[in-house]
C-alpha cells in the first residue's frame, strides 16, 4: 500500500469554500457547507463520511448536476484547469466539460446503464457528443477501443449486448468505459465498488490505478468505507455534516487520525469482509443539515466535547504539511 | 417463448368465446326480430312458421350452440335486412374501421408523447399546468360531441374538410381526431409520469455526467424507457378506438363495421350484430397479442420465458 502524493505546483482541481443549498419544502438544506479540497494530476483523493454527509452533493456541485428544481451553489469556486466551473454557462459546461474533462460514475453500476440501449450505443454516445468519433463505423471502433481499455473481454462482440447481459463487475467496467471514453482529466467515482463482491472490488481498484498511471488521471473516490479508501487513495478527506473535518495523506489518517470522528470511522472498518453496523463505536445521529448547530457538528456524539465545542465551530489547524483538522481537541496533540 | 404464445392464444380464445356468449344473449334479450320482419297484421301461423324456419323456436342455449358451430366455419347466417352473408357484409366494412382506429390511435399518440415529455421536462411550468387543464377539458368531452364540434367548425364554418363520408385523406382527418381525442389526456399522464421517473434515474444522470446533450437524453435515452408503460397499454387503447368507432362512424357516416352494427342493432339484424361484434373482439384480442409480442422490440430485457 505504498502511495506517494505526486509532486505538483498547481493542483488539477481546487474547490474553494463551496456551499451548496437544496431548497426544499421543509427548509433550506445546507448539503455542502464550506468545503475546500484539492486534487492533483495522477492523484486519488478519498472522500469519506457517513451516509448523508454531502459527499455526492459535493461532487454533483463540481459537475454542476444538482437537482434542477432545488439545488444551487450559493458560494465558492470550483477551479479545474484554471477555469472556475461555477461561472460557466450551462451550454459550455455540457459541451466542453462534462464527460470531456471531468466525468462522474454514479453510485450503482446496476442502475447506471440504460436498460434498453446496447452497451456500444451508450459508450459511443459521449464520443459522438464531444466530436471524438463520427459515423456509425467510427463510433463503433472508438467504443471497442474504450471497452478494451477497461479490459472487457471480446469487446467487439459485446458491443451489441444489452446491460442485463453483463455481470455486475462487467457492468461496472462498462460504466467506467463511458466515463473514460473521452479521456477526462478528473474522474469522480461515487461508491463505485460498494455493491460488488470483494474480488471484483479489488480488480476494479487495480484497474483504476493502472489507468491512472497511464494517463495522470485525477480521481475523487467517494466511499463510506475507509478500508476501500486505504487501498486506493493517496489522500483522504473526511466529511461530516456538510463540512470537511480532516484531510491528510492516507498514512497519516490511518496512523494519526486527529479528529474523533475519523477515529470512530476507523474503528468501524469491517475486518475480513465482515460488515459491521456503521459507526457502532459511537451512538447517535448526524445533525440536521437544515438547522445545523453553531458549534462543532460532531460535538453531540463526541466523547471529548467541551463547552467550547458546543459554542463555536473549530478553526482548521495544520498539524503537519499534509494534515489539517477542524477540531478544538485533536487527538494526538494531547497524547 | 412458444409456451407464452400458446398461453396468450388460449386466453384470447377464451375472451372471444365469452364475448360471443354475451353478445348472443344480449341480442336475444333486446327484442323479437320477427316483429320487424313481418308486418304486425301477419297471421300467427305464419309467425310461428317463420320463427321455426329461422331457428328462433329452439331454446336459447341450443340456438347459441348452433350459432357457435356455424360461426366457427365463418357462417353467421344471412343478414335479415340485406339478404347476404352477414360475415362478408361486415368484412367488407372492416378495412375502413381498422383505418379509422389506427388513425385515431396515431393521433392520440402523436399528441400524447410530445405533451407528456414536455410536461415532464418542464414540470410545474405554465406548459405543464396548461396541459393539465387542457387534458381535463378533453376528458370532459365525449367523442360524438368533439365530432359535432369539428364538423361545425371545419366543415360548416371554415369549409376546409368534408363533413362526412370516406375516400380521401381529408375525410379521415376529423373522424380520427374525434376518436383519438379522448385518450390523449390519459396517455399524456402515462408518458409524463413515466418520464419523470426515468429523468430521475441513475442512467440519465450518468448520461449527463458524461456530457450527452440534454435533447438526446430526453428524446432518445429517456423516451424509449418512458414509452414502455404506454406500449403495454396500447392494446387497451386500440380496443377503446374500436369501441369509440361505433359512435364516431355514425356521426361521420363512416362506412365501417361500427356504423353497420349500430344500424343492425336498430333493425334487430342479429346475424350482422353478432358477426360485427365478434369480429371486433377478435380484433381486440389480436391487437393485444401483437402488442405483447412487441414489448421485446422496445425492451430487450423481456424474454417471455418466465
Ligand atoms: N434530491 C434530494 N432532495 C432532498 N434532499 C436531498 C437530495 N439529495 C440529497 N439530499 C440530502 O442532502 C444531504 C447530502 O446528501 P448526499 O447525497 O450528498 O449524501 P452522501 O454523503 O452522498 O450520502 P450517501 O453515502 O448515502 O450517498 C443529505 O442530508 C440528503 O438527505
Ligand atoms: Mg452519495
Image (cartoon, rainbow, N blue to C red):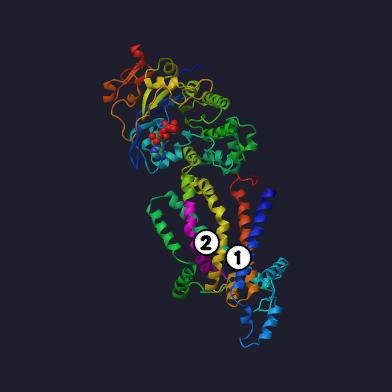
Compare residues A198 and A187 and report the one nearer the observer: A198
Q: Residue at x 48, y 48 (%)?
A: B195
Residue A88 rendering spot, x and y as whole percentages: 38, 38
Residue A199 rendering spot, x and y as whole percentages: 58, 25
Label 2 chain ID: B
Residue B158 rendering spot, x and y as whole percentages: 45, 73
**Residue named by callout 2:** B107
- N-terminal of the pair, mark 2 or mark 1, is 1
* Badges 2 and 1, same chain: yes
Can residue A165 be found in the magenta stretch? no
Residue B95 rendering spot, x and y as whole percentages: 63, 67
Quadrant of res B130 = bottom left
Can residue B178 be found in the magenta stretch? yes
Q: Residue at x 61, y 61 (%)?
A: B284
- Ligand 1 sits in which quadrant? top left
Looking at the image, the residue that sits furthest to the top is A335
Give the vertical position of B79 relative to B113 (above or below). Answer: below
Quadrant of res B103 = bottom right
Q: Which mark is residue B98?
A: 1
Q: Is residue A74 left or right of residue B94?
A: left
Mark 1 lies on a secondary structure that is helix
The quarter of the picture where the C terminus of chain A appears is: top left
Span colored in magenta = B168-192
Amino acid at each position: 500500500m505504498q502511495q506517494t502524493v505526486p509532486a505538483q505546483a498547481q493542483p488539477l482541481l481546487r474547490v474553494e469554500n463551496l456551499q451548496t443549498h437544496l431548497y426544499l419544502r421543509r427548509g433550506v438544506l445546507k448539503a455542502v457547507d464550506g468545503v475546500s479540497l484539492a486534487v492533483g494530476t495522477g492523484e486519488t483523493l478519498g472522500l469519506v463520511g457517513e451516509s448523508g454527509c454531502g459527499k455526492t452533493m459535493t461532487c454533483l456541485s463540481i459537475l454542476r448536476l444538482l437537482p434542477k428544481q432545488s439545488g444551487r451553489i450559493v458560494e465558492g469556486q470550483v477551479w479545474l484547469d484554471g477555469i472556475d466551473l461555477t461561472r460557466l454557462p450551462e451550454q459550455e459546461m455540457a459541451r466542453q466539460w462534462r464527460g470531456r474533462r471531468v466525468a462522474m460514475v454514479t453510485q450503482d453500476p446496476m442502475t447506471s446503464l440504460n436498460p434498453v440501449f446496447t452497451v456500444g450505443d451508450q459508450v459511443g454516445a459521449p464520443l459522438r457528443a464531444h466530436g471524438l468519433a463520427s459515423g456509425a463505423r467510427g463510433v463503433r471502433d472508438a467504443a471497442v477501443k474504450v471497452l478494451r481499455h477497461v479490459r472487457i473481454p471480446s469487446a467487439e462482440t459485446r458491443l451489441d449486448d444489452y446491460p442485463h447481459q453483463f455481470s455486475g463487475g462487467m457492468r461496472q467496467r462498462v460504466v467506467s468505459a463511458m466515463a473514460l471514453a473521452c479521456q477526462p482529466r478528473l474522474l469522480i467515482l461515487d461508491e463505485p465498488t460498494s455493491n460488488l463482491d470483494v474480488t471484483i472490488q479489488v480488480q476494479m481498484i487495480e484497474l483504476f490505478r493502472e489507468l491512472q498511471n497511464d494517463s495522470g488521471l485525477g480521481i475523487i473516490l467517494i466511499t463510506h468505507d475507509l478500508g476501500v479508501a486505504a487501498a486506493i487513495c493517496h489522500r483522504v478527506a473526511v466529511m461530516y455534516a456538510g463540512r470537511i473535518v480532516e484531510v491528510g495523506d492516507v498514512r497519516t489518517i490511518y496512523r494519526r487520525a486527529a479528529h474523533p470522528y475519523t477515529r470512530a470511522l476507523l474503528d468501524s472498518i469491517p475486518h475480513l469482509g465482515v460488515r459491521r453496523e456503521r459507526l457502532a463505536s459511537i451512538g447517535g445521529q448526524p445533525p440536521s443539515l437544515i438547522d445545523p448547530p453553531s458549534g462543532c457538528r460532531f460535538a453531540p456524539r463526541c466523547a471529548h466535547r467541551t463547552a467550547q465545542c458546543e459554542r463555536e465551530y473549530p478553526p482548521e489547524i495544520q498539524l503537519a504539511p499534509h494534515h489539517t483538522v477542524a477540531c478544538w481537541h485533536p487527538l494526538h496533540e494531547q497524547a | 417463448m412458444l409456451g407464452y404464445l400458446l398461453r396468450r392464444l388460449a386466453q384470447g380464445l377464451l375472451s372471444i368465446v365469452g364475448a360471443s356468449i354475451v353478445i348472443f344473449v344480449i341480442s336475444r334479450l333486446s327484442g323479437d326480430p320477427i316483429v320487424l320482419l313481418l308486418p304486425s297484421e301477419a297471421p300467427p301461423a305464419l309467425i310461428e312458421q317463420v320463427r321455426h324456419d329461422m331457428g328462433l323456436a329452439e331454446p336459447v342455449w341450443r340456438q347459441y350452440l348452433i350459432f357457435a358451430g356455424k360461426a366457427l366455419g365463418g357462417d353467421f347466417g344471412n343478414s335479415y335486412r340485406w339478404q347476404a352473408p352477414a360475415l362478408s357484409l361486415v368484412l367488407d366494412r372492416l378495412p375502413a374501421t381498422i383505418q379509422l382506429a389506427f388513425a385515431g390511435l396515431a393521433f392520440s399518440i402523436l399528441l400524447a408523447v410530445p405533451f407528456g415529455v414536455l410536461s415532464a421536462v418542464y414540470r410545474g411550468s405554465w406548459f405543464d399546468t396548461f396541459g393539465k387543464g387542457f387534458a381535463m377539458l378533453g376528458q370532459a368531452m365525449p367523442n360524438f360531441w368533439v365530432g359535432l364540434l369539428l364538423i361545425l367548425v371545419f366543415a360548416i364554418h371554415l369549409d376546409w374538410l368534408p363533413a362526412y363520408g370516406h375516400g380521401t385523406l381529408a375525410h379521415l382527418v376529423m373522424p380520427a381526431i374525434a376518436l383519438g381525442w379522448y385518450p390523449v389526456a390519459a396517455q399524456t399522464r402515462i408518458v409524463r409520469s413515466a418520464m419523470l421517473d426515468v429523468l430521475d434515474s441513475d442512467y440519465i444522470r450518468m448520461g449527463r455526467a458524461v456530457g450527452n446533450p440534454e435533447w438526446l437524453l430526453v428524446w432518445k435515452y429517456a423516451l424509449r424507457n418512458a414509452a414502455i408503460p404506454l406500449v403495454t397499454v396500447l392494446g387497451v387503447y386500440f380496443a377503446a378506438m374500436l369501441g369509440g368507432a361505433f359512435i364516431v362512424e355514425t356521426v361521420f357516416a363512416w362506412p365501417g363495421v361500427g356504423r353497420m352494427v349500430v344500424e343492425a342493432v336498430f333493425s334487430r339484424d342479429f346475424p350482422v350484430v353478432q358477426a360485427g361484434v365478434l369480429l371486433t373482439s377478435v380484433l381486440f384480442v389480436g391487437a393485444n397479442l401483437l402488442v405483447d409480442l412487441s414489448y421485446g422490440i422496445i425492451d430487450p430485457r423481456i424474454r417471455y420465458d418466465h
